[in-house]
Image (cartoon, rainbow, N blue to C red):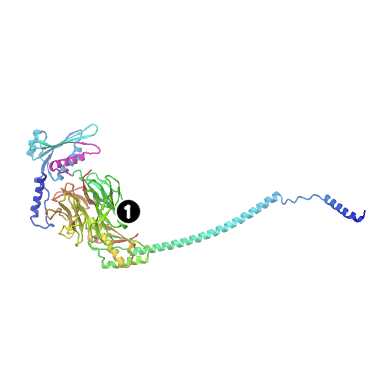
Amino acid sequence: MRPSRLIPIATLALLMGTVACQKPAPAPTGPSQAELDAAKKAADEEAARKAAAEEAARKAAAEAAAKKAAEEAAAKKAAEEAAAAAFKAAADKALVNIHFDFDKSDIKEGDRALLQGVADFMKAYPQAKVEIQGHCDERGTNEYNLALGNRRAAAALSYLKTLGVDEARFTTISFGKEKPLCTEAKEACWSQNRRDEFHLK
Amino acid sequence: MTRALFRTLFCALAAFAGLGLSAQQTEVVLSATSGSKLVLAVAPPKLTGLDEATVARDFTGVLQRDLDETGVFGLLTEKLPATTDPSSYKAWKEAGAQWLLATRLTKSANGEIQLEASAIDTNAEKAVFTKPYKADRLVPLRRLAHALSDDLVFQLTGVRGVASSRIVFVRQLSPGVKEIFQVDRDGANLLQLTRNGSLSLSPSVASDGRLAYVTYKGGAPAIWGQRTVGGAQVKLYEAAGGGMVSSPAWSPDGKRLAFVQGDRRGNTDIMVLDLASGHVRRLTDGSGINTEPSWNPDGTQMAFTSDREGGPQVFLMQSDGSNLRRLTSEGTYNASPAWSPNGAMIAYVSRFEGKFDLFIYKLGEGKAYQITTGVNTSESPAWSPDERRLVFTSNRFGSMQLFTTDLSGRQVVRLSDLSNCQSPAWTRAR
């Protein structure tokens, strides 16, 4: 046998021996259960922290958005209220009673400016719709006064039409002498009752 | 007897008309004078099981007021004989009674009240009327008195009296809230017919008792009423677009409803609604105010108020709108025409010195007669079903209240002390 052949065999044996004599190393199974739990806990905590942070951020963003929205809504509401108040104020200022002579439905000269005010209001507020109510004093029959009140409402309607307001924006109604403002039997009272009233519909 | 009474009535009219006074100044006696009334004595009722005070209040007092307002009986109340047996008839006659009314009221153990009534002609010394009546909870004593009064009027005139009739009217409960009410002709038994909580106006009662009126409960005015006798109140008509409607008036046959509709140009027209078909027809021509339609008794004509010739005046037309002619000529404000049940007269109001008075226009004569006079207003006349009286509203005691008057204007009776009343209609009870 040649020695040159023995070397690899010895080496092999040595190697094998070495291999066989090595202490068995711990199995490569990763961290212990405790370590795993700890890691998991840590991870969970981290995730929770992250989630909380995200939640907080989200919340903050939502709060900010809500606050902004609320501010916007409040601003809008305030604007609307202001507009409504302005509308109401304009209506209150413009929609005032006009008056008539006994058994008459002619628009009095002094009331033309008042009707111009009604027309201006209607033009300034194109959404406005108005009911014209005709009323009478007590010195006529109930039924004739209902007809006269209708004529008084129509007289205002006709005049407003000439001022350029679409008549479709008005309804007319007569209350005759059924809804007096004043109930004493004297001219000061009767003259108040012979009227057209204008009411937002 | 009826004819004799009417003859007296017409003679009185003719006599006053002959004085040649203007309608505004004339005070004309249209009704029978006391001399032409039949003198009736009501003997104290014979009572069994009833106390005198109750009977005096709920029966005798009611009966005497009823008879007094019939216009055909004069009541004898003094120096009455003590008994009503046949031997006393001569004494009753000597006391002035043409008829003696003897009554017996008996209350049985079950609470039922029997009334036996007989009217004796003291001249012929025999009964001209005998009738038994029964009262119970539903028909109280005062309704027996009304029924007896109505029967006695029928016995005398051939036309049933109106003591059992009712007034339907409008009453304000609070500003802006007016409801329809009903009350007996003597002011008893007030009953609220609508609960709309709004303006309810212009009641009209059909001959079969159905009610129609205008209510603003939906905002715009609409005509509501009963399609069937005793039926629910339903909407009968509303103008397209919620326009003005007023003044419903049942036709005499109860099939049509005249009413008033306003347009947006200020005109108001008389319209007729056919209830069965729902068809509406305009009768007037859309110029000016036309309102307050009142049918004649056969439904062929209407009286109404129009300002087509200036101020309000009463006009007539056929119920198809043809043959329009003016009725009233004197005065600047004549309105509220009410055609009488027999067709010969039209009651209306005329404005004079700031207040209204009642007038009657006699179609046969072509003349108007003033019924009420005074510093206070008298408005909204409506005929009694027997055409002997008018119900109206007046403020003579302050607030507007219900009154009735005979056609002479002499016997004005306040119907009740209810205040804020308007638009009365007079209807037979059913």
| Residue found at the very far right of the displayed protein | A1
Q: Is residue B57 above or below residue B173?
A: above
Residue B182 lies, in percent from the top left, at 24, 47
Quadrant of the drawing holding the C terminus of chain B: top left
- Residue range (magenta): B133-161
One can see residue B394 in this view: no
Q: Quadrant of residue B112?
A: top left
Packing grade of label 1 (10 A; few <14, some 14-19, many >=20) is: few
| Residue at point 24%, 32% (across, down) | B110
Q: Is residue B132 above or below residue A121?
A: above
Pick whichever, A31 or A19, lies toward us: A19
| Residue found at the very far top of the displayed protein | B109
Quadrant of the drawing holding the N terminus of chain B: top left
Pick whichever, B363 or B134, lies toward us: B363
Q: Chain of mark 1?
A: B
The residue identified by callout 1 is: B218
Residue A191 lies, in percent from the top left, at 24, 61
| Image-based side of A146 in relation to A45, left or right | left
Residue B128 lies, in percent from the top left, at 12, 37
Residue B137 lies, in percent from the top left, at 25, 37
> Is residue B136 highlighted in magenta?
yes
Q: How many marks?
A: 1
Q: Is residue B52 above or below residue A17?
A: above
Q: Secondary structure at mark 1?
A: loop
One can see residue A52 in this view: yes
**Residue type for callout 1:** Gly
> Is residue B132 highlighted in magenta?
no
